[in-house]
Image: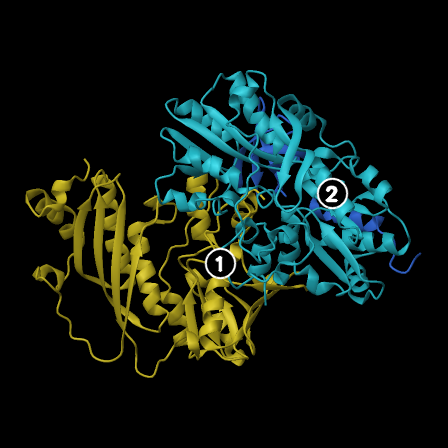
Chain colours: A cyan, B yellow, C blue
Amino acid sequence: MTDISEVIKYLKDYKGRPLKLMEVCGTHTAAIFKSGIRSMISDRIKLISGPGCPVCVTPASFIDKCAGYAMKEDHVLLTFGDMMKVPGSSGSLADLKGRGARAELMYSPMEAVEKARANPDKTYVVAAVGFETTAPAYALAIEEGISQDVRNVRFVTALKTVVPALTWICENQPDIDGFICPGHVSVITGSRPYGPLAEKYHKPFVIAGFEAEHILAVIYEIVRQIENGRAEVRNLYENAVRTEGNIKALKITEKYFQPGPAMWRGLGTIEDSGLYLREEPPVGLYDGGSRGLDEDIQLPRGCRCGDVIVGRINPDECPMFAGQCSPGNPFGPCMVSAEGACGIWYRNRK
Amino acid sequence: MKITMAHGSGGKDSAELMKNIFGRYFSNEILDRMEDAAVLDIKGRTACSTDTFVVTPLVFPGGDIGKLSVCGTVNDLLMMGAEPEYITCGFVMEEGLDIDVLERITASLASAAKDAGVSVIAGDTKVIEGHGGLFINTTGLGRIPEGRSISASGCRPGDKIILSGDLGDHHACILSARMDIGNDICSDCACLSEVTGALFDAGITVRTMRDVTRGGLATVLNEVASTSGTGMKIYEKDIPVNLEVRGFCDILGLDPLYMGNEGKLIAAVPGEEAQKALEAVRKTAKGRDAAVIGEVVQGKGVSLVTDLGGIRVLDVLYGEGLPRIC
Amino acid sequence: MCIAIPGKVVSLENNKAKVDFSGNTVMVNVGLVEPKIGQYVLVHAGCAIEVMEKDKAEELISIFAELEEPYKA
């Protein structure tokens, strides 16, 4: 039993061996900066951002596909704000708006069905990006579309699952000592999936919420486990995360989506790490052409977007950082996406 | 009835519009002369600002584009320590604009001008093709009393920073209308003359003032820090944000530090005068929730001390502050 | 990933709920959970993904209660 001030003191005074802890959730990346957590803990505990921004790991061909719909007559693209500024091969969706593209912000994918029903002469295309947290929301929207026989909706998906990426990191970045598990992905998946990883790679996997106190508690727990030679899965977000996850959400995701290979910028193609709409009608009719969107733009020489995404380097170690690459002139999504590591580091740099 | 291209052509429809709407609500000694330009007799240092208002929706809880045009312009003058006297307004109306809405906005602008003690001395109207929108451009003029010198370059290490009230209300109000989120958030659109007046009446040495508009507090403080060659340190626990606005920001993943207001200011005053300045501002209607939020320091950039004692560097706003999912 | 915040269920109708976030009300799809009026639900992208049993203060207390003391092996 301890309290927040003791935890902060312990982490500040930590003099053990240097540790690298990775989070794989863009919202955690942002929360860590927002709370100033790095300034509160020892320099020997390095917090690394892994591939936790679904926008950043999505290749440019996805943006191009969405942009194509946005420029198409009688089509309207619906997207979350995160996607608007990410560069495709001919510019971002925001750039294309200036050239006549119809791209609107959405708060929820359910809006696609509502709008489609109200405007039968237009086709609404959803830029369906996300991890396990958002997949059930898209599934609910498709279910609503089917039950109301609303046909003028399409989903272009770039849905990915986190555990395959964690496995890739464990295989390719053995110097990561412990993992801060994504809180809201875990609400859906539960804590079970991390067990085999903890056992195989002998590293702690601890689930964190998003307040500063949650994250500090998790960092503390991971450090203590490492010091005591333990490698366990622990859920420190029990208020929202159950061991078995949200069964209804898992079921509806499985009903409408099936796993498939997905291209992760920086990591390459990972088997069974993507979710694709099932092909049989009526579900398959809602797919806006999501398979095979693997091509990426050629990043300029010197750009180390891929290394940043997997946490091999910090953004400020990329030679383009804050020089040729900045939010006003980004070379890659990491600099523009609200939860891209480079963009967050840039906005918080001294 | 709607605005059509005929209303902009200078013929009969234009004349009727001028008479029934603009002439009816904007009337003063200078404007009534109906000359091609206003002739003023201005002596001494005079502040001049210009602004263009393009907000949608045109009418929102707490105000409308007309009221906003006056408050925004007057506030820019007040931030230089000026006493606003004159304002001009150019209306660019899109075809399809509802004339009742136009009248409501014109009346609101006239009323706000009267409350702010400024005269509308020149104006212009144009009609363009479009879908019922309205844009208003203004210029404001006001004399700066002798001996008063307020500038973004004026603040010094040791000064304290006062924020006149809650962050983010205007931005949250406008976005709420667009994102279908129900709440009672109103724009804080208001003239800050009572607040600035209170500081001067209390004899405070005001070094710098800025209204917290587009880009929010973080952006404004960065601009001032950069212009004055100083750094700023502010404290999360001291920054006022009302609960409803915070809830709204949480839903959309927005940060109140980067959300715009239209009726709040920051003022940098010498450290030893901060308490007196705060008390003076708190006595005003628009400054009731004012707080001392931090201090000016040596160095550069703006940093925030978080609730738990961590340090977060605050840069200017990049991009648009769009609602996020991630 | 994933911004999700807790809000209070104010009313329920079929698979939708009116959820209040400090005075902001949003219609939320509750197809993935079984909430009662007055309970808090975690909402992401307009969908409730879980029911929250404790409030934030209670939750943090219980998290810290489970952490071992700093100087205990």
Crowding at dot 1, Cα within 10 Å, few <14 / some 14-19 / many 20+, comes out as some
Q: Chain of mark 2?
A: A
Q: Is residue A251 above or below residue A223?
A: above
Q: Which disc, if any, is residue A196?
A: none
Relative image position of residue A189 (x, y in whole percent): 72, 34
Q: Which residue is mark 1?
A: B317
Q: Is residue A151 left or right of residue A97?
A: right
Q: Is residue B314 above or below residue B107?
A: below
Relative image position of residue A16 (x, y in whole percent): 85, 63
Depth-wise, is mark 2 or mark 1 nearer the camera? 2
Is residue B207 visible from the viewing direction of this image? no
Relative image position of residue B61 (x, y in whole percent): 39, 45
Label 1 is placed on what type of residue? Leu
Q: Which residue is mark 2?
A: A168
Q: CA distance from mark 2 to mark 1?
A: 35 Å
Question: Are dots 2 and 1 on a single chain?
Answer: no
Q: Secondary structure at mark 1?
A: loop
For image coordinates 33% across by 44% down, the residue present is B59
For image coordinates 59% across by 16% down, the residue present is A280
Q: Is residue C1 left or right of residue A204?
A: left
Seen from the viewer's position, the closer of residues A323 and A180 is A323
Crowding at dot 2, Cα within 10 Å, few <14 / some 14-19 / many 20+, comes out as some
Toward the left, the furthest residue is B12
Q: Is residue A105 left or right of residue C48?
A: left
